[in-house]
């Protein structure tokens, strides 16, 4: 599916996409949160790109772990420890690998999402990034790894549906939970940023 | 002496809690870890890590957080440190900090101070 050099390239593309969407993500967060998601994510991934040359020759596990550590240190909001833990856990399942296939990618995703659940102690249906992550993972597992294109497309479609679903529910986790019913009608910024990232991965394939 | 670290999204809030505790606890190591490295709103892994290291005199450190990412980022600092004398305290920030500071100043050990600070959750401000 991909090798370490392509992963580095992909991280740059993710950084660009997050940067393009920074204002949109921050606007989403302004409606139900603390107005920093886009700015925070853009700052984190900008630093990732700056520091990538130092690890570009290393294995994919080491690269992903480094990304996680950078995000924890630079993002500043809740998405820092959440995405940071996700990348660190993801790196853990591909330690030493210079190349990965679609099965590895599913393992990366599963470990990363498990990290988000562990750190955030959230479940499906609480209006968080998990509402895009968990359906995307399920859809990709169901699609299977024989056809990587179809697998990625299924994941993106499910993530987008998950984002739409977050508009219909009340937030019960994070700062948005204080808003109660006023959070209905707004899509979750974290679910949206995950979908942007997954879409970038699917487009790059 | 037990050290205390105040973690907040706001640099001003963290420093304010430290200032308030100092009135009653002149000698303990108590550190503020508020805001991002540039002073903006958020929580900083590096700031928390640095504050814990400064507050650790060998008798343990208690970390009190405001909410959300302050808790999650502190968890990651603890996992990275691997020091079993450093603990998070689940309590109201101001009340818990004041209680912890006074007891730490009195020489109580880290787990006892932690338990007392956590009991601050139950204290009512207005008696009914």
Image: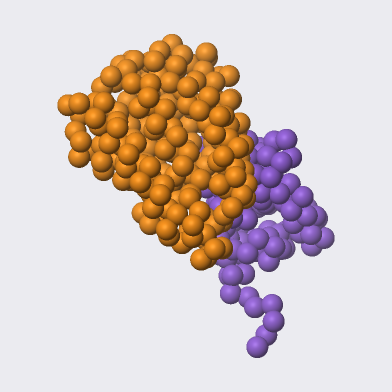
Chain colours: A orange, B purple
Q: How many marks?
A: 0
Nearest the viewer among A90 and A17 is A17
Q: Quadrant location of the C terminus of chain B?
A: bottom right
At horizontal 82% and vertical 60% (from top left) the residue drawn is B23
Nearest the viewer among A78 and B30 is A78
At horizontal 31% and vertical 45% (from top left) the residue drawn is A135
Task: Give the percent coordinates (x, y) of residue B99.
Answer: 68, 65
Which image quadrant for residue B51? top right
Query: Is B56 situated left or right of A72 in this image?
Result: right
At horizontal 52% and vertical 65% (from top left) the residue drawn is A180
Regarding residue B103, the answer to whether it shows in the image is no
B106 vs B59: above or below:
below
Task: Give the percent coordinates (x, y) of residue A131.
Answer: 38, 49
Task: Give the percent coordinates (x, y) of residue A57.
Answer: 43, 11
At horizontal 32% and vertical 17% (from top left) the residue drawn is A2
B50 vs A54: above or below:
below
Regarding residue A147, the answer to whether it shows in the image is yes
Nearest the viewer among A87 and A176 is A176
Task: Give the percent coordinates (x, y) of residue B55.
Answer: 68, 45
Residue that lies at the very extreme toward the left in this rendered image = A146
Which image quadrant for residue A115? top left
């Amino acid at each position: 599916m991909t090798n370490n050099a392509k992963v580095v390239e992909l991280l740059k593309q993710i950084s660009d996409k997050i940067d393009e969407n920074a204002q949109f993500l921050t606007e989403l967060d302004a409606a139900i949160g603390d107005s920093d998601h886009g700015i925070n994510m853009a700052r984190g991934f900008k630093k990732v790109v700056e520091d990538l040359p130092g690890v570009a020759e290393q294995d994919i596990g080491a690269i992903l772990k480094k990304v996680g550590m950078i995000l924890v240190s630079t993002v500043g909001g809740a998405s820092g420890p959440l995405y940071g833990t996700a990348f660190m856990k993801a790196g853990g399942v591909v330690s030493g690998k210079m190349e990965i296939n679609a099965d590895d990618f599913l393992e990366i995703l599963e470990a990363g999402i498990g990290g988000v659940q562990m750190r955030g102690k959230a479940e499906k249906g609480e209006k968080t990034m998990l509402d895009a992550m968990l359906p995307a993972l399920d859809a990709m597992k169901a699609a299977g790894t024989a056809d990587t294109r179809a697998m990625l497309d299924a994941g993106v479609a499910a993530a987008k549906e998950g984002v739409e679903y977050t508009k219909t529910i009340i937030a019960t986790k994070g700062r948005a939970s204080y808003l109660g019913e006023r959070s209905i009608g707004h899509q979750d910024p974290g679910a949206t940023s995950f979908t942007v990232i997954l879409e970038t991965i699917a487009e790059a394939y | 002496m037990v050290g205390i670290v105040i973690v907040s999204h706001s640099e001003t809030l963290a420093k304010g809690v430290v200032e308030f505790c100092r009135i009653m606890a002149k000698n303990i190591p108590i550190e503020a870890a508020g805001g991002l490295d540039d002073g903006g709103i958020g929580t900083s892994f590096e700031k928390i890590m640095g504050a814990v290291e400064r507050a650790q005199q060998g008798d343990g450190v208690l970390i009190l957080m405001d909410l959300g990412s302050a808790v999650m980022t502190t968890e990651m600092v603890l996992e990275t440190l691997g020091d079993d004398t450093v603990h998070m305290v689940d309590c109201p920030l101001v009340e818990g900090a004041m209680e912890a500071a006074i007891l730490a100043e009195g020489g109580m050990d880290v787990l006892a101070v932690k338990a007392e600070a956590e009991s601050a959750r139950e204290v009512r401000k207005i008696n009914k």
